[in-house]
Image (cartoon, rainbow, N blue to C red):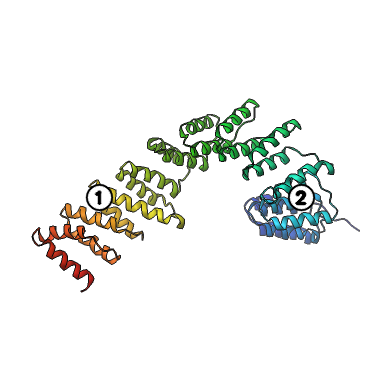
């Protein structure tokens, strides 16, 4: 029987996969089969990995299950690859069944497959003990835990706030001759920061540097986040400068953590500096970061600057999520009232019109602030506009607002009569 020719996987195929052109890549494989060219395991695994990269585990499984159709018998490497993708995609029930199926087929446990199994079991507090048990039993299967094994367990323990166990495992790891990687150190640093052991986390950073293990963006970001959580934003700023001096670009998490910390400590100038640096780097602040800075402006009674930031949000097209809508409403009302108190009448009215155009709810206190300031400025036309919209929105003006408006319209003597008349008109009686 003539064997099928083996030809190279077409050169354009990796480009198709990196461009997420999966159907065209699969069509090429079908064409290879029709032309009686051998479809290799590497070709099909490359498609499986590509589907895993874009979080399509079901398509990945579909391609894997078609391997035999292409007369390609999957090896242990294929099974381990598929198992790993399922775990990475948190398809844990399917992953555990798949691992059981692997064992039923007679594939012996090896270090890569056991590492993936430990990773899956480390994702939950209910299965963490099983992960440790399998880790301890690895030598019984002729498998020696490696750096990845230890790192996976340490990461899982840190996520579950079992920091002391994670630290013990780090010591054991070094005794066994496994050097902790930057990922392992970062996991432990992050766990320590989350548990308010920031000083110990800083010591680990110095230990890394002493061992010539280069911290990465995630290492520094974890430390900055930890320092900012516990009102140590000055130290966080120093870590940022160290990070930049080591040629690491801060990411969205880095800047967000620092901005939240600076705003919580009411450090407006530093917050604005970081905000500008973030934008200069090409990163786009989200609504939450704008709110933090705007709220700080309001706290300092810098309402004009706060209004400018609100305009900037609109100009930049920052989306407002449903979960932050109540904060969106609160901030806008606060800024309008602040502008009224600062006697910036035109700016207040401009923002008020913008708010109504966007469908943001105006509260009674804001309406009354606007009416009062327009009455004070003797701008009865705008006062009447706001009052009319206030009534349409179902807000009942207070007696003080009625009196102020009546005094301006009717004069002091007939103010009470005017209030009673206007009240009757509004109530329809």
Report the mark closest to the observer, 1 or 2. Answer: 1
Query: Residue 12's spot in the image, x, y percent?
Result: 68, 51
Q: From the viewer's side, name the closer residue of 201 and 329.
A: 201
- Numbered disc 1: secondary structure: helix
What is the spatial separation of the Cα atoms under label 1 and label 2, in whole angstroms?
66 Å
Residue found at the far top of this picture: 210
- Numbered disc 2: secondary structure: helix
Is residue 110 in view from this perspective?
yes
Verify CB contact (< 8 Å) between mark 1 and mark 2. no
Query: Residue 55's spot in the image, x, y percent?
Result: 64, 54
Q: Is disc 1 surrounded by few (<14), some (14 to 19) or many (20+) residues within 10 Å?
A: many
Report the disc number at residue 127. Answer: none
Is residue 38 in view from this perspective?
no
Q: Which residue is mark 1?
A: 340
Quadrant of the frame with the C terminus: bottom left
Report the disc number at residue 80. Answer: 2
> In the picture provided, is 312 more to the left or to the right than 79?
left
């Amino acid at each position: 029987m003539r064997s099928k020719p083996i030809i190279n996987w077409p050169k354009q195929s990796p480009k198709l996969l990196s461009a997420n052109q999966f159907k065209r890549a699969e069509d090429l494989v079908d064409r290879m089969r029709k032309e009686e060219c051998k479809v290799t395991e590497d070709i099909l695994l490359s498609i499986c990995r590509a589907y895993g990269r874009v979080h399509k585990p079901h398509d990945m499984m579909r391609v894997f299950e078609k391997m035999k159709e292409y007369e390609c018998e999957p090896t242990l490497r294929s099974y381990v690859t598929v198992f790993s993708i399922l775990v990475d995609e948190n398809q844990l029930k399917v992953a555990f069944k798949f691992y059981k199926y692997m064992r039923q087929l007679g594939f012996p446990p090896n270090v890569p497959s056991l590492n993936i199994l430990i990773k899956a079991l480390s994702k939950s507090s209910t299965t963490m003990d099983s992960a440790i048990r399998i880790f301890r039993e690895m030598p019984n299967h002729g498998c020696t835990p490696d750096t990845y094994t230890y790192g996976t367990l340490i990461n899982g323990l840190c996520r579950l706030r079992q920091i002391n166990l994670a630290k013990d495992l780090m010591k054991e790891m070094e005794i066994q001759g496994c050097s902790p990687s930057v990922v392992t150190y970062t996991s432990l640093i992050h766990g320590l920061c989350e548990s308010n052991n920031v000083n110990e986390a800083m010591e680990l950073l110095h230990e890394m540097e002493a061992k010539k293990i280069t911290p990465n963006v995630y290492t520094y970001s974890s430390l900055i986040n930890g320092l900012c959580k516990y009102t140590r934003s000055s130290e966080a700023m120093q870590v940022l400068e160290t990070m930049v001096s080591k040629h690491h670009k801060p990411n969205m998490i880095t800047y967000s953590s620092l901005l939240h910390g600076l705003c919580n400590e009411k450090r407006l100038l530093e917050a604005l500096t970081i905000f500008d640096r973030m934008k200069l780097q090409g990163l786009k602040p989200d609504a939450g970061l704008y709110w933090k800075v705007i709220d700080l402006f309001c706290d300092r009674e810098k309402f004009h600057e706060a209004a400018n930031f609100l305009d900037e949000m609109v100009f930049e097209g920052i989306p407002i999520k449903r979960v932050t809508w109540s904060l969106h409403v609160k901030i806008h009302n606060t800024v309008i009232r602040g502008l009224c108190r600062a006697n910036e009448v035109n700016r207040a009215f401009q923002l008020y019109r913008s708010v109504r155009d966007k469908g943001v709810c105006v509260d009674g206190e804001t309406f009354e602030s606007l009416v009062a300031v327009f009455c004070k400025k003797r701008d009865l036309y705008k006062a009447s506009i706001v009052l009319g919209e206030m009534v349409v929105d179902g807000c009942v003006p207070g007696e003080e607002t009625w009196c102020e408006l009546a005094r301006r319209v009717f004069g002091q003597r007939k103010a009470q009569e005017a209030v009673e008349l206007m009240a009757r008109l509004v109530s329809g009686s």
